[in-house]
Image (spheres, rainbow, N blue to C red):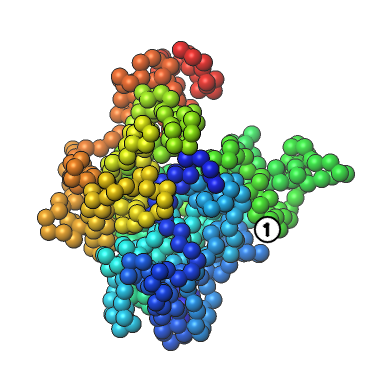
Amino acid sequence: MRLMAPRSRHPRLLALLSLLLTLACDREPDSVAEDSSRRTLTGKGGSVTGMVGRYGNHEWRGLPYAEPPVGARRFRAPEPLVAGRGAREALQFSPPCVQFAHPFGVNDAPTGEVVGSEDCLYLNVYAPRMTQAEANRAKLPVMVWLHGGGNVVGHAAGYHGGNLAQRERVLVVAPNYRLGPLGWFHHPALADPARPADGSGNYGLLDAIEALRWVRANAASFGGDASNVTVFGESAGARDVMALLISPPARGLFERAIAQSGAARHFDAKSASALASEGGHVNSSGEVLVRLLQRESQDGRALDAPSARKRLAAMEPAAIAAYLRAKPPSELLAAYQHDDQESMLSLPNLIADGTVLPTTRLLELYAQPDGHARVPVMMGTNRDEMKTFLFSSREHVRRITPLFMRVRDPARYEALSEALSSAWRVSGADAPAAALARNQPEVFVYRFDWDEEPTILGADLSKMLGAGHGLEIPFVFGHFDLGRRANLIFTDENQPGREQLSERMMGYWAEFARRGKPGRGGAVHAPEWAPFAAQQDAPSFMVFDTDASGGVRLQRGATSLDGVVQRVRESKKLVSPRQRCRVLRELARTSGLLERSDYPRIGGEECESYPFESYPWGEG
């Protein structure tokens, strides 16, 4: 078959958390699955050989969708794949894109080690088992998955799409996309008037767009309907999906969109490139260049920061671009400020450059009739999003042994989770859904509530993790075989309920991909999922839980930022002004809905004695 070129160790329990952002993961070895049968598709230009996967599905691993972004192609928009001819074996996953090893990403190397390859623009295809003749006429809905990981870690091979494809008869496509500084680096020296996208800094998003072009050109060869494409993702992948809705180069490349635990926000170009003293991010491209130059020796001595800034100011744009393209990935990554080995790298991504992403705020564009792709949208969050992150924090959880743990301050733990998870819901579901629903009816919102984890050595994981960030992924993919460590979460006791819930969720996701409406998820007696704004005074959303905890059910209501702040102020769990102000400060610092400058406003007189910049405030 011819692949057409598109036109146009961690040793502690923290390792458990590698499950939570890659929860559909099954890092099968780069070899044939237990059923060693091959599956070859043949076309005019040659053939591609895949395999029969663990769910009886067909799958093809490591298919290239763009030219390798190496050498002169670094910090440029991806170039369409030059179509090859002849036979290709697609039996092994490609390397992940360059990144720091991390429990939430590549977790088979020591945390903080640089892993992956720049030559990483490959994808995996999962299809139901079909004959060649059946594939030729199948026209299955296509679901393109963008993985999470903060746009700095993760990889497509961490997600097994075989069960979703086989059970629901859809085509699942999972691409890698560039991450970290190689995926998101906006600097004026990289601009090229003849190729505006090259200067955008949004190389990871442009990779996703190129993968969608590849799908348009090649889905039919695998049994997919190239005119019925759903792009879906989780966390950073969901933020990418939400950005694709407003990206001009992405228009016309997909027919539906699903955002799981995303957020409607991006970075402005100034914060992405300017020095910190001039309003830039601490890891802006300008700051990174200064740090790189500081490491350069002059007369046997390293440059100080003022000298490095002076040298940078004297360099021509072409020299800066050549300098950046010559640096090994490990040196680029080493130039970023990093809190500690366990935290993910923070850097500007999804940059409002004016070409790939408009400079207008996402919510404003969602509210405009022509400001976004008018396609059906499904979005939602998990009830306890923040517990995944609180659980991994030494500040909040005390670990005496890897399996013996206790929450340090249960009241603060619950209050922080409730406030920050509710704020996440505003940014990732209710606010964008309300804006989109002004001009289109096909907007559907959900909340994921499953929290039936076991108790381990007295630690109740159902309270410590709850319906945390990333936990919905294995339910969507119908894949819970995540290795021995996963047995801490997915046990024999909770198996019947979670598998039934997973079947229902797969049904709703696939029905949305088929028809643009989740309906009853392909079932006769399941509840019908009503659009978010069917009742303007009380928007509808679907709750996903087991029958033992209320079941899958439609509810009404929406969350607002003002409501979140008010609940913190009135919380019975926070018994002092200091405790309330700590939560409000965290809300301003991390929610993405507020700036630090908003803290005095939301804190009011009560928080005047607890200034933002002087935290921690001591005991009391």
Label 1 sits on residue:
325
Residue 70 x/y as whole percent: 63, 64
Residue 180 x/y as whole percent: 56, 50
Q: What is the three-letter code of the residue carrying label 1?
A: Arg
285 relative position to 156: left or right: right
Position above or below: 540 against 327: above
Task: Give the structural element (helix, strand or loop) at label 1.
Answer: helix
- Asked where in the image residue 448 lies, by quadrant, the reply is top left
Question: Between residues 167 and 7, which one lies in front from this camera angle?
Answer: 167
Question: Between residues 485 and 190, which one lies in front from this camera angle?
Answer: 485
Q: Is residue 434 visible?
A: no
Residue 55 x/y as whole percent: 33, 66
Question: Between residues 419 and 452, which one lies in front from this camera angle?
Answer: 452
Count neighbours of disc 1 (C-alpha within 10 A) and say few if under 14, some if 14 to 19, many if 20 or more: some
Give the residue displayed 17% in from the left and 56% down from the top: 520
Quarter of the figure that contains the N terminus: bottom left
Residue 434 x/y as whole percent: 28, 43
